[in-house]
Amino acid sequence: MSSDIVKYADKYAQRARKAGKLIPPLLCERCGLMPPVLGHHPDYTKVLQVIWLCHKCHKAVHPGNNHQIGKPHFNLK
């Protein structure tokens, strides 16, 4: 996947969140335990389809993918 597409999807989702169009849930959508702090795009061409994951789950869905491990796409802070 092109890094330009990833950056575009991340920026678009950040703006949508700030505008109130993307609202994260209270818990991680994968494990249901930890508060989600990261937005994850399963498909970067669908910029508003985001799954909210805790850091641990986000790393788990991207094993060995250096651009996401330790470098979240976008934080909720």
Image: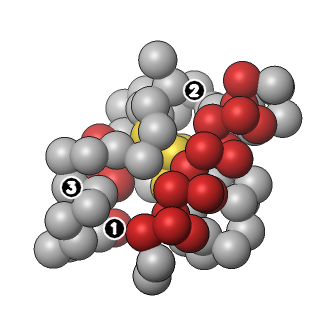
| 63 displayed left or right of 55 | left
Closer to us: 40 or 30: 40
- Secondary structure, mark 1, is helix
Q: Please tell me the numbered disc located at residue 26.
A: 2
Judge depth for marks 2 and 3 and give the one in front: 3
Tell me which residue sits at (27%, 61%) in the image.
Answer: 67
Q: Position of residue 38 (x, y in %)?
A: 44, 40
Q: What residue sits right under mark 1 in the picture?
A: 61
Q: Please tell me the numbered disc located at residue 45.
A: none
Q: Position of residue 41 (x, y in %)?
A: 56, 62
Tell me which residue sits at (15%, 74%) in the image.
Answer: 64
| 12 displayed left or right of 36 | right
Q: Amino acid at mark 1?
A: Val
Q: Position of residue 19 (x, y in %)?
A: 81, 25
Q: Amino acid at mark 2?
A: Leu
Upstream in sequence: badge 3 or badge 1 = 1
Question: Can see residue 51?
Answer: no
Quarter that holds the N terminus: bottom left
Q: Give the class, few, some or many, for how many residues have Cα within 10 Å of label 1's Cα (few <14, many ≥20).
A: some
Q: Please tell me the numbered disc located at residue 69.
A: 3
Upstream in sequence: badge 1 or badge 2 = 2
Quarter location, residue 3: bottom left
- Secondary structure, mark 3, is loop
Question: Can see residue 55?
Answer: yes
Q: Give the class, few, some or many, for how many residues have Cα within 10 Å of label 3's Cα (few <14, many ≥20).
A: some
- Looking at the image, the residue that sits furthest to the front is 4
| 7 displayed left or right of 20 | left
Is residue 15 placed above or below 60 in the rendered structure? Answer: above
Is residue 66 placed above or below 37 in the rendered structure? Answer: below
